Image (cartoon, rainbow, N blue to C red):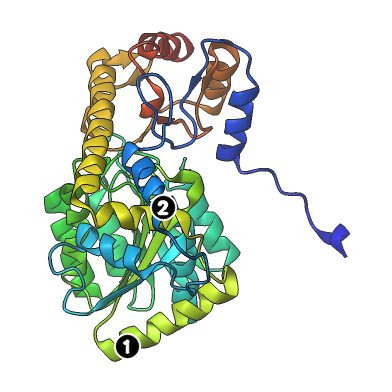
Amino acid sequence: MLDRLEPQSPDALLALIKLHAADPRGDKIDLGVGVYRTEEGATPVFAAIKAAEQRLVEEQDSKSYLGPEGDTGFVNALMPWIFGEDATMGGRIAGMQTPGGTGAVRLAAALAQKAGMTRLYMGVPSWPNHAQIFADLELEAVPFDHANADGTADLDAVLRAIRAASPDEGVLLHGCCHNPTGIDYRPQEWERIAEAFEASGAFPIIDIAYQGLGRGLEEDASGLRKVLSKVPEAFIAYSCDKNFGMYRDRVGAFYILCDGTEMLDKAFSNANALARASWSMPPDHGAAAVRLILRDNELTQMWQDELDEMRARMRQVRDRLAEAGMAGSVDLAPLAAQNGLFSMLPVTKEQVVKLREEHAIYMAGSGRINVAGLTTGNIDRFIDALAAVTG
Ligand code: LMR
């Protein structure tokens, strides 16, 4: 039976981790997978997480099952950070813990499909796993252009997609720090997007995996809040893997916005059943640590300070790249206005291979770079190599 299966190539982004690890060159630069790195090139555990884990070891008195919805204390503690002061929007939002943001996107897609969605619109390029998840569920993903060639968001394209979508068709948006382009909608553009959703009735699915890594915790959630304030229903996929540095602990949440308690209960019960049939229950540890942080003022402050520092460092890297202007044929100036870990460089696949083979610089085949992989120690070498390869 198994002989019928076609071999699958490994996920290109995850394969890069192994390629980079196997490279013996001492001056190699990793701009591949999306993890934050310090000026020293490390991805340390947040001090706030360490402190919370310590407390967890002392205080946790059982590891007995919690249920498909996971740690509801964690799910609720996150809500004011995502949705603002009226965290449940008058009792219209409910959520559950998921294995990472990926689990949340998967659950959103599966629940949408169960409710009858067969098609959704998706800006491209996007995080490659979005397309894989939708294809796996046989949800048709209709592409539209996310960005213009000048490095700004293509507002007309997203508005057209929202207008074209019917109420049982979705439109997937990135809440902030667009992956892979770093190009986010500006506040006035979110306003137009929210109005378009209100007019068309299209179903918003918002993936927010980098809150706090763009402009600030509040700023990064403001677009999403504008959309939610105008629509009766929506799904939100959230990840703590980056903004709490919990990558391998898989800490995510899925939220449902509905137009009434009865409908919310019904949708939630279906999400619960899907989670049970998929992973039964999410892994506990990371979410419990995040809950402890968000319920303690001192730890919350510590976490916010660490997040501020990360954001400031990435901003410095972006400013330094933008200052360099042209590197060969690549204009780095637009990178200053972009947000988060990623930017996409207009380089060919051959140039990406050349950068890897001749300069030990690792980036995704699409030309996406993780700006957090650059430091004061390696940024000039990167700019020079980019100029050499594309000039
Ligand atoms: C990325 O895009 O690099 C991250 O979201 C990691 C992943 O799972 O792909």
Residue 59 lies, with reference to residue 330, above or below; the image says below
Q: Is residue 48 left or right of residue 143?
A: left
Q: Is residue 229 left or right of residue 13?
A: left
Is residue 157 among the parts visible in the rendering? Answer: no
SS at circle 1: helix
Q: Is residue 99 left or right of residue 88?
A: right
Q: Position of residue 374 (x, y in %)?
A: 38, 21
Three-letter code for the amino acid on which mark 1 is drawn: Met
Q: CA distance from mark 2 to mark 1?
A: 40 Å
Residue at image point 30% right, 22% down: 332
Image quadrant holding the C terminus, namely top left
Number of marks in the rendered image = 2
Residue at image point 26% right, 55% down: 294
SS at circle 2: helix
Q: Is residue 256 left or right of residue 113?
A: left
The residue indicated by pointer 2 is 58
Q: Nearer the viewer, residue 73 or 117?
A: 73
The residue indicated by pointer 1 is 263
Mark 2 crowdedness (10 Å alpha carbons): few <14, some 14-19, many ≥20? few
Three-letter code for the amino acid on which mark 2 is drawn: Glu
Mark 1 crowdedness (10 Å alpha carbons): few <14, some 14-19, many ≥20? some
